[in-house]
Image (spheres, coloured by chain):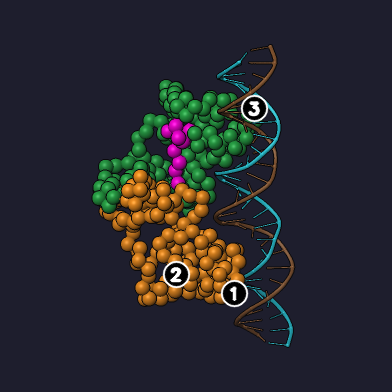
Chain colours: A orange, B green, C cyan, D brown
Amino acid sequence: MRPPRKDQIQAEQQKFHDYLEKANLQLTPGRNIVFQEVMKAHGHFAAEELVKLCQKHARRVSRATIYRSLRELRAAGVIRETAFGEKHQHYEHVYDEKLHHHARCIQCHRVMEFPCMEEDEKYVSILKKRGFHILGHELHFYGLCPDCVMRR
Amino acid sequence: MRPPRKDQIQAEQQKFHDYLEKANLQLTPGRNIVFQEVMKAHGHFAAEELVKLCQKHARRVSRATIYRSLRELRAAGVIRETAFGEKHQHYEHVYDEKLHHHARCIQCHRVMEFPCMEEDEKYVSILKKRGFHILGHELHFYGLCPDCVMRR
DNA sequence: CCCTAAACGAGACACTGTCTCAATAAAATG
DNA sequence: CATTTTATTGAGACAGTGTCTCGTTTAGGG
């Protein structure tokens, strides 16, 4: 996933601000630092990476604030969780949403993305028939990425 | 997923014993207790649930042994991990393997299963073309299960 | 300028899993 | 059978990730 364009950052900022306003929350320095770092990060990142980045700032931001802000960004629809079966949660941006799936290398942990296809609809209709209310889905392949296959 | 039939338990036991022999490991009381509890459990279970179950036995089994045995059972192909984006790992049985996917309720955490279809092959061929060596895949829907939809 | 409520940081705590190390049991050997 | 070697184990320390509490700070609103 390429880094967000300026106008996309703008849009995300708007989204976040709108959310804060609706939820009666203020755009405080702490929240803003977390937001900025999240926008700088691209691809998939772990919460703890963000903790390290945020704590490099002059104004110290506590873990508590960072985790709190991540939840807010999630609620605002700026980032989303992705489950990789590791011990810690990963996030990715939502902007420019072309729904995609993930292939994760079990060796180097790199993640490849590939677009979601309408084939998934068949599953969707099965689940709907069974009364399951779908909020989202993700197809997750695991294996060896091209580089790690070579290295063998 | 229904509980394993007797002959399936037999087969799994054989698999485990074969693995132990090949790996020069012995079928010790500790390992056996873990195996028995794993076979009793069905559906998806977390490591910590198993810890609790195993520790009810007269012969105390330590966390270390349980986690070690779980790894062995995984290596033996008796159980497999499933990533649900929660904080702890889940496992499920491998016996009577009809490959299936999961729909998890974000409210009650129950998991529905549905069969894997050949539609996935399209993704497989895309990834292969890109040089990714696939070891496995899982489609993961999340949302509200029928019961939780009702309860709203 | 004061009052109140929101936001914050520090650190305790909880959970899950790993690791080490000394004690034990079991097998192999003489 | 005694001794040596090796595998296995349990206890608990440790680590990583995330949550929670609580006293303090900050910032508006009056």
Look at 58% across and 34% down and name the residue there: B65
Which numbered marker is on residue B62?
Answer: none
Mark 2 → mark 1, Cα distance in angstroms: 18 Å
Magenta-span inclusion, residue B78: yes
Amino acid type of the residue tagged 1 in the rendering:
Arg
In three-dimensional space, the C-alpha distance between marks 1 and 3, rounded to whole angstroms, equals 54 Å
Image quadrant assignment for residue B118: top left
Q: Magenta part of the protein: which range?
A: B73-83
Q: Chain of mark 1?
A: A
Asked whether the beta carbons under mark 1 and mark 3 sit within 8 Å of each other, the answer is: no
Q: Position of residue A14 (x, y in %)?
A: 43, 75
Q: Nearer the viewer, residue B2 or A138?
A: A138
Between residue B111 and residue D30, name the one nearer to us.
Answer: B111
Q: Amino acid at mark 2?
A: Lys
Q: Secondary structure at mark 3?
A: loop
The mark nearer the N terminus, 2 or 1, is: 2
Badge nearest the viewer, 3 or 2: 2
Nearest the viewer among A130 and C15 is C15
Label placed on residue A59: 1
Q: Nearer the viewer, residue B75 or C24?
A: C24
Q: Which residue corresponds to the image point at 45% horizontal and 27% vertical from the top-left?
A: B22
Q: Residues within 10 Å of mark 1 (few under 14, many from 20)?
A: few
| Mark number displayed over residue A40 | 2
In the rendered view, tell whether residue D14 sits above or below residue C4.
above
Q: Which residue is mark 3?
A: B59
Do marks 3 and 2 share a subunit?
no
Discs 2, 1: same chain: yes
